[in-house]
Image (spheres, rainbow, N blue to C red):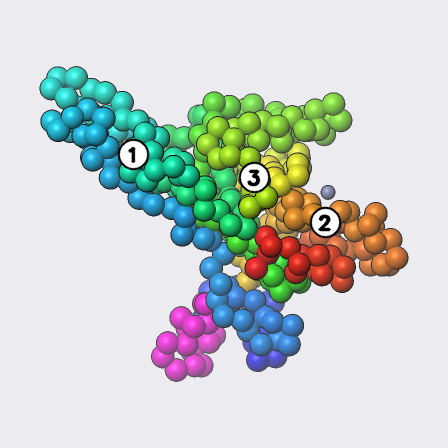
Amino acid sequence: MHLLCHIRRFVSLAALVTVLGAVLPGGAAQAAVAWAHGSPAPNGVPRGPAPPFDSSLLSSLDLQAAANEQYGPHARLVGDWKHLYGLRVQLGNHLHNLDVARAVRKELGTGWTVAAVGPTASDWRGFHVGALHNQTVAVMLIASDQLNDVSGVRQALAHYASVLDVDYVWYKLRATVAPRFTTPLIVPTSIDSATWANLSTSSADDTHRYDLFNAELNAMEAWVPYPNTRYRSVVAPYAGVRPDLWLGAADGGPVAAGVPRETSVACDPAAPLSSQCSDASYAIGHELGHAYGLKHSCDAYPQYSNCADSIMQTGKPMGAILLPPEIAHLQASPFLH
Ligand SMILES: [Zn+2]
């Protein structure tokens, strides 16, 4: 197992599976995939796989039933399932809009809110906000001019999930506990890509340091309530593939906010991280640390000579550390599992 641990640090997941598949009996390759996404316990023994995304609070919707509820028994759902807002309700010769939020209220009741897990009409869901219990709600904001780029949004979701996956694996590795992220939700915004880009770059200016954060918060809150004592949130904007936009990550109490880079890079926690993946998972991982109550390491614990290596100072995954009191804090937090 020591050899495998060593291998894991230096070869890609695909290469690892190939290596194991070649030397282990049938079925081992699949197990190796699960193992590679788990994380070693302190004694070096692999932990079981732990999918980082919680989909238990999502419910599908019967949109045809919603059309009938809203427009009567003769209403027919028509239109374009390939876009989030593509559906219409046909009644005689007239087309009407479908009220998906109303569908959520009627079909699922109070405590639920309307959500989308992707950019098509098949991605509408109800989200059981009232049942959130110590999760970290993951939200990806979509620039107004990107929403109809279905494949682009899907790729961005995969990128964002991969960055969160790195942070999940990293927290498990360093603290033995990690956030329980919900399946990332998309939130359409009225802000276009150029404006998101400007908000990111202008955050270098002190007077505009929190403009990006505030814009993200406003956009998120249109769909997902501001976190309360029962959960935390992590959010990042998609403004097209812009791995160069890395300025402006911030936290505000229970919300960790990333930047366009976090939705623009594909990262694999089982392989050596590119510098962009290391930066992206640092930005999110650091702001999450604040959202879970950690301060900057060298301010809070100057007695530790290695405080700068913590993710709460300048340490970046996967090499970033956590100081013993930071680990203790996270292990006592209800938001890490
Ligand atoms: Zn900070």
Q: Amino acid at mark 3?
A: Pro
Q: Is residue 321 left or right of residue 178?
A: right
Q: Amino acid at mark 1?
A: Lys
Q: Amino acid at mark 2?
A: Leu
The mark found on residue 106 in the picture is 1
x 32%, y 40%: residue: 108
Q: Is residue 238 left or right of residue 112?
A: right
Q: Quadrant of ligand 1?
A: top right
Q: x, y (%) of residue 57?
A: 41, 48
Specify the segment rendered in magenta: 19-35
Quadrant for the N terminus, please: bottom right
320 within the magenta span:
no
Q: Which residue is mark 2?
A: 294
Q: Is residue 320 visible?
A: no
Report the residue that reaches farthest toward the top: 94
Q: x, y (%) of residue 274?
A: 61, 52
CA distance separating discs 3 and 1 = 24 Å
25 within the magenta span:
yes
